[in-house]
Image (cartoon, grey):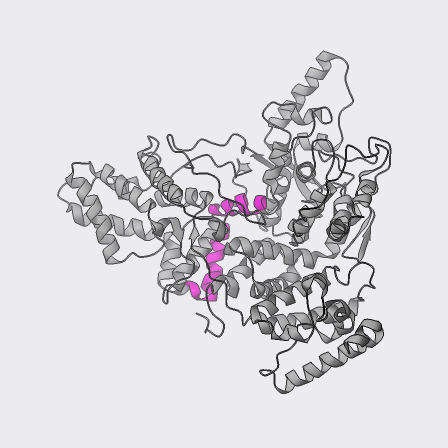
């Protein structure tokens, strides 16, 4: 049979189909004895010639032996197959594409198979999750009811000077004029004398809350100890700034039993700090520590400061609960929920619900999520998730050549990106608060822009020879750059608006002198479709830009580059996506021609299904694939919520969440509710076959 397969694709398809039908028939008779193969019947004739049992392409074998793989490997293989077929990556270029009916049938069969194998795979061991720098700051602020941040937070890219997130309108609506700024290059100082620990490492998709990246070395543990003491010893840590001063730090009235009072206060304090009731031994140790300090002659507030600093240095504070012991599941859920939405520890109301077990009830959980979404602390979710998902911090590192983009650098120390970065972040705020369809992140009906941005998209001003006139224009530009006023404007020009076609993304995916279509293509695949490419091989030669003919276009240079077999696979997929945005120059302004006069070719095909001839039809193609975009976005959101890499069972959760939200256009708040109710979020650490808690 192998010789026949090698000599005749038609007979190979027939033989493969017969083989798979035989296996399927046997599986139906005795499924436990002979498990189903990974490859669905509808694809047997198309795939086995290349992915059979002899030297399979890409080391992916889909023959009968795939049914004997360990269950976890089968699940991962099925996810890869779904992604490859759904994205049009398979069959590869040069082979006839699948028709829509065959594709849908194959994906449907694979999803059934994924449900069979994915739910049988144990959730990965969840490592302890240390607080990252942002969570540490928020947890300490909430614990002490501090009126400011502890230290500078440059990772917070947008500062809101209005309370527009708590919209009182019905339906909710952000005002048409808002006041925001990007202070990441000069963040607020925080408490005097308090220095933060270094920024946390970013994982593959840009998130800094992933458990496997949040290690705790001896040096960092020592830094936490010194940090905790510097907080309580700061001159800014006083009755005017600390909301719990009277109930925790202030000396008790004369005649009150000091030890009993210390114990009472610590019981209430440690319950919040350690995210649940502490046992008697733990409470006794902290009480004894405070009483010892009092016995050494320290004033009551100072003794309690020392005790509070000790609590902030404890692993019970530095590590938030993920996998709980039996009976502690509600507290674990409350901790995950507060970290996800508030970037902090649970408040007392959330702890009350958890300790009673009420939070496990779906109706109570719904009301809890509604309260948390309406609370001002939801700003922290909006501070971190969208910026890290869109990788916008990279925009602040953009350095276009001053000779090509003079007005980008018109204000020393404040590049134009401090305005550009606010446009996609404000759009996310609006889509979130107003519960607009998710696809409006790509093709919005309205968005927020400043005078600076509106002028920027109109193009560079004409050169001015007169020095006085040029200085006056620069002064106007500087004033606009420093403005905090952003107004809602309709998206009348489809070339601009949305998270794909804006100056921040265009500039951060460009080099100093030219655009980088590959970087833009990678950004699209990672952010919009959650399908990051594999790292390039180490032996790939660089693109020889200096030696290139100045009369050819970047696309023509890349066509030559793709002749290298090592480059062709990824570039065939990435280049069309990057070139779709080639009309945007290194600072996000529109252009129709290169500097050499050649017209820009921004055409391509998305998923081998949607032809486009530029950025506007490219965005329309993404809108046509809005369910795929919603799945990718939900997967990003779930990874952020869980703080770990997703596994095949999480793919099933994403599909269920998206299906439930489809009729409403996948609004972000609905996706959040779906995540909170999913097994992936609620049942961390549960093994296959174990009853839900």
**Relative depth, front residue between 96 and 231:** 96
The image shows residue 440 at horizontal and vertical percentages of 68, 49
Residue pictured at 50% horizontal, 32% vertical: 187
Q: Nearer the viewer, residue 489 or 651?
A: 651
Would residue 346 be seen by someone viewing this image from the given angle? no
Query: What's the residue at 20%, 36% (across, down)?
Result: 299
Pick out the residue farthest to the left: 255
What span is in magenta?
359-388
In the rendered image, the quadrant that contains the N terminus is: bottom right
Residue at far front of view: 3
Image position of 310 (left or right of 609): left
The residue closer to the viewer here, 641 or 128, is 128
- Quadrant showing the C terminus: bottom left
Q: Position of residue 201 (x, y in %)?
A: 51, 44
Q: Quadrant of residue 496?
A: top right
The reply to whether the magenta stretch includes residue 268 is: no
* Residue 581: percent from left, percent from top: 76, 42
Residue 87 appearing in the image: yes
Outermost residue on the bottom side: it is 29
Q: In the figure, 241 relative to 39: above or below?
A: above
Q: Main secondary structure of the magenta part?
A: helix
Please state the horizontal and vertical placement of residue 123, each as a whole percent of the image. Answer: 50, 65
Q: Is residue 53 left or right of residue 195?
A: right
Q: Is residue 442 left or right of residue 252?
A: right
Q: In the displayed structure, would residue 685 be above or below residue 296?
A: below
């Amino acid at each position: 049979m192998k010789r026949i397969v090698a000599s005749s694709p038609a007979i190979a398809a027939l033989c493969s189909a017969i083989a798979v039908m035989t296996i399927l028939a046997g599986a139906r008779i005795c499924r436990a004895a002979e498990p189903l193969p990974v490859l669905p019947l509808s694809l047997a004739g198309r795939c086995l010639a290349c992915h059979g049992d002899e030297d399979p392409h890409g080391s992916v074998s889909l023959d009968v032996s795939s049914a004997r793989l360990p269950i976890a490997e089968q699940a991962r293989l099925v996810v890869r197959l779904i992604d490859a077929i759904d994205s049009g990556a398979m069959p590869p270029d040069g082979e006839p594409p699948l028709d829509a009916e065959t594709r849908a049938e194959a994906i449907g069969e694979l999803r059934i198979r994924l449900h069979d194998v994915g739910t049988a795979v144990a959730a990965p061991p969840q490592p302890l999750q240390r607080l990252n720098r942002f969570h540490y700051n928020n947890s300490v602020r909430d614990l002490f009811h501090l009126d400011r941040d502890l230290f500078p937070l440059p990772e917070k890219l947008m500062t809101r000077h209005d309370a527009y997130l708590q919209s009182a309108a019905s339906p909710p609506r952000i005002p048409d004029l808002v006041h925001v700024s990007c202070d990441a290059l000069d963040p607020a100082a925080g408490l005097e004398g308090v220095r933060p620990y270094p920024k946390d490492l970013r994982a593959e998709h840009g998130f800094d809350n992933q458990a496997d990246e949040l290690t705790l070395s001896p040096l960092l543990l020592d830094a936490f100890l010194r940090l905790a003491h510097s907080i309580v010893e700061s001159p800014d840590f006083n009755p005017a700034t600390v909301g719990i001063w009277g109930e925790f730090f202030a000396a008790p009235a004369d005649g009150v039993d000091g030890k009993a009072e210390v114990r009472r206060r610590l019981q209430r304090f440690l319950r919040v700090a350690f995210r649940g009731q502490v046992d008697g031994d733990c409470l006794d140790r902290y009480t004894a520590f405070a009483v010892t300090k009092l016995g050494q002659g320290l004033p009551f507030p100072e003794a309690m400061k020392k005790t509070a600093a000790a609590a902030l240095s404890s692993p019970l504070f530095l590590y938030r609960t993920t996998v709980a012991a039996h009976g502690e599941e509600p507290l674990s859920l409350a901790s995950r929920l507060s970290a996800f939405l508030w970037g902090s520890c649970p408040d007392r109301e959330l702890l009350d619900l958890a300790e009673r077990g009420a939070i496990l009830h779906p109706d109570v959980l719904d009301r809890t999520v509604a309260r948390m979404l309406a609370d001002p602390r939801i700003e922290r979710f909006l501070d971190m998730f969208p910026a890290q998902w869109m990788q916008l911090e990279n925009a602040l590192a953009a350095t276009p050549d001053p000779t090509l983009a003079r007005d980008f650098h018109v204000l020393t120390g404040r590049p134009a990106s401090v305005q550009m970065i606010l446009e996609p972040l404000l759009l996310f705020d609006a889509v979130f608060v107003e519960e607009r369809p998710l696809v409006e992140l790509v093709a919005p009906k309205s968005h927020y822009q400043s005078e600076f941005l509106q002028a920027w998209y109109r193009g560079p001003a004409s050169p001015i020879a007169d020095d006085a006139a040029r200085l006056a224009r620069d002064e106007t530009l500087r004033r606009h750059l420093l403005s905090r006023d952003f107004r809602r404007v309709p998206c009348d020009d489809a070339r601009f608006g949305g998270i794909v076609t804006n100056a921040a993304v265009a500039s951060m995916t460009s080099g100093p002198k030219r655009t980088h279509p590959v970087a833009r293509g990678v950004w699209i695949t990672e952010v919009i479709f959650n399908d990051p490419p594999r790292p390039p091989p180490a032996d790939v030669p660089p693109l020889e830009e200096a030696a290139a003919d100045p009369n050819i276009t970047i696309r023509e240079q890349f066509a030559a580059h793709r002749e290298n077999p090592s480059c062709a696979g990824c570039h065939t997929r990435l280049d069309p996506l990057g070139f779709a945005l080639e009309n945007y120059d290194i600072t996000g302004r529109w252009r129709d021609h290169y500097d050499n006069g050649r017209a820009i070719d921004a055409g391509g095909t998305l998923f081998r299904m949607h032809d486009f001839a530029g950025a506007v039809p490219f965005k329309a193609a993404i809108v046509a694939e809005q369910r795929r975009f919603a799945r990718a976005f939900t997967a990003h959101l779930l990874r952020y919520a869980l703080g770990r890499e997703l596994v095949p069972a999480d793919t099933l959760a994403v599909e269920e969440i998206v299906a439930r939200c489809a009729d409403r256009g996948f609004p972000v708040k609905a996706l959040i509710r779906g995540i909170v109710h999913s097994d992936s979020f609620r049942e961390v650490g549960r093994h296959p076959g174990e009853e839900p808690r």
